[in-house]
Structure formats: structure tokens, C-alpha cells
Amino acid sequence: MEYFFILLATLLTSIVTLFSGFGLGTVLMPVFAIFFPIPLAIASTAVVHLANNIFKVVIVGKWANKNVVLRFGIPAALASALGAYLLGVISVWEPLATYQILGHEFNVTVVGLSIGIIIILSSLFELIPKLSKLTFPAQFIQLGGVLSGFFGGISGNQGILRSAFLIKSGLNKEEFIGTSVISSVLVDIVRLIVYGWAFFSKKFAGAISTEMFGLLIVASFTAFVGTYIGSILIHKITFHTIQVMVGVMLLIVGIAISTGLA
């Protein structure tokens, strides 16, 4: 049953991300985290995210602005390595607190609290109008790459900051979409290399199984289907409504993860 919810979330979110520019990792990671250890959830989300972005690169990658990719995408990729490494470090720390509800034990961990807070902050960017329209001056584009990549590595949430910085970088619509996708792919590749090393060295809590590989393959295919459906529905869906729904869900899941309930 948990796999059904993961695939459903992948399908629906990939539809939205085609025209939002972000959201797949932001929404999918908390869904994975409900059923799997957080480090494994983040790494699994990165796999699906990368597969879907490679599919997008084939379609829109030719529109990318090479200069902006160098100024934004490269710093983002480098910073994602640091974020991914720190995730591996804090994932094995002892719980901060333990409590019981109806005979069930729950742990508040450093990684859970950290990721939960980041998800809660992400929900505010969806729910608060002023934050959802937040952008940054073009001269801060390298800093934007660093921040976006770092949070992408440590939590899987990079798209909101990426869009906020790139939207003011002087790109037209096509260049914005292509540059965003290429930059995201660079971050995904680097952080997956670090995640892979962390799993190999057993720094991440939890182990990846053969069954998990099958789920990732199906989830990636589901994301492709969602992207295709999104291309058909792109002019028929009110994004504001979806944005509010995503924000509420992120807020609930972020609280659950940070308190150890999920």
C-alpha cells in the first residue's frame, strides 16, 4: 500500500513540476520519508528526480543559457556535495529525545528535526503570497547556486531557491526552463555520487534493498508519465490551488518528521 501512495504522489507532482519549475523533490521526499529512513528517502528521491530531469533535458535542455549554468549550476553542484556529506554525518547521530504515544515509541533525531524544519519552511514559500513571489537580485546568482545546491544535498529541497534566484537572472522563459533543468541535473548527479559513497561506507542509517531498486524504476517511469500528462494539461490547471494544497501537505509532513511521528 505504501508503494501505491509513493507512485501516486510521483504522478501528481510530476504533472505540477512541468510548469512550476520545482516541486517533485519537495513533495516526493516527505512521502518517501513516511515509509523509509530519511537518508534513504532523500537518496531515493534524488534518483527519481534525476531520471525525470534527464527526460526534461532531452526536451528543453537546448534552451539553457551556458553562462548562467556556469555561474549558478556549478556552484550549486559543488555545494550539494557538502550538503549530501553532512546528511551522511548527522544521520547516524543518537536521537535527541524519545517519547511514547499509545505504547508506540518515537524518536526525535537531528536529521529528522533538521529536515522537518526545512520542509516546514518550504511550505511557507507555498502558502504565504509574499514568500511565494520572493526573488533575488541577479548579482547574487552565485550565492543562490550555493544555497540551492546545499539544501538540495542535505534535504532534497533545492527547486524553490533555484527558481527564486534564476527568475531575476535576465533569462527569457525558454532559457529559464532549460537552465533550471540543467542546473538541477548537475546537483542531482553530484549528490547521488556522495549518497552512493555514504551508503557504501555505511554512513547512512538504513540499507537499500533489491525491492527498493524496483520501486525507484517504477517511480521514475511514473514521473515520465506525469510529465507527459502535464504537457497536455498545462493550460487547464490553476497553479495557485495546487500550490496551496502542496503547502498544506508539506506543513503537516514537516511537523510529523521533525517530531519523530513519521
Image (spheres, helix red, strand yellow):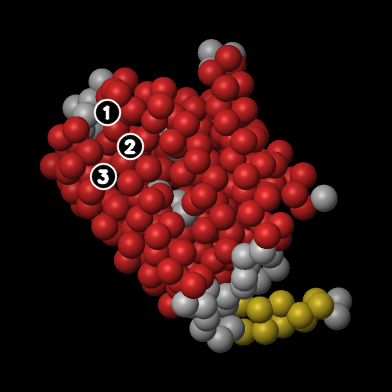
Mark with earlier residue (1, 3) = 1
Residue most extreme to the right: 102
User: At 46% across and 64% down in the image, what residue appears?
Assistant: 196
- Distance from disc 2 to disc 3, alpha carbons, whole Å, reads 7 Å
Residue 18: mark in rendering:
none
Q: Secondary structure at mark 1?
A: loop
At horizontal 64% and vertical 35% (from top left) the residue drawn is 222
The local secondary structure at tag 2 comes to: helix
Q: Earlier in the sequence, mark 2 or mark 1?
A: 1
Q: Is residue 26 above or below residue 83?
A: above
Mark 2 touching mark 3, by CB under 8 A? yes
Tell me the number on the disc at residue 182.
2
* Residue matched to label 1: 64
- On the image, which quarter does residue 232 sit in? top right
Residue labelled with disc 3: 73
Residue 41 in view, yes or no: yes
Q: Residue at x 29, y 52 (%)?
A: 77
Q: CA distance from mark 1 to mark 3?
A: 11 Å
The CA span between labels 2 and 1 is: 7 Å
Quarter holding residue 245: top right
Which residue type carries mark 1? Ala
Decide: marks 1, 3 in contact (CB < 8 A)? Answer: no
Q: Amino acid at mark 3?
A: Gly
Q: Residues within 10 Å of mark 1 (few under 14, many from 20)?
A: many
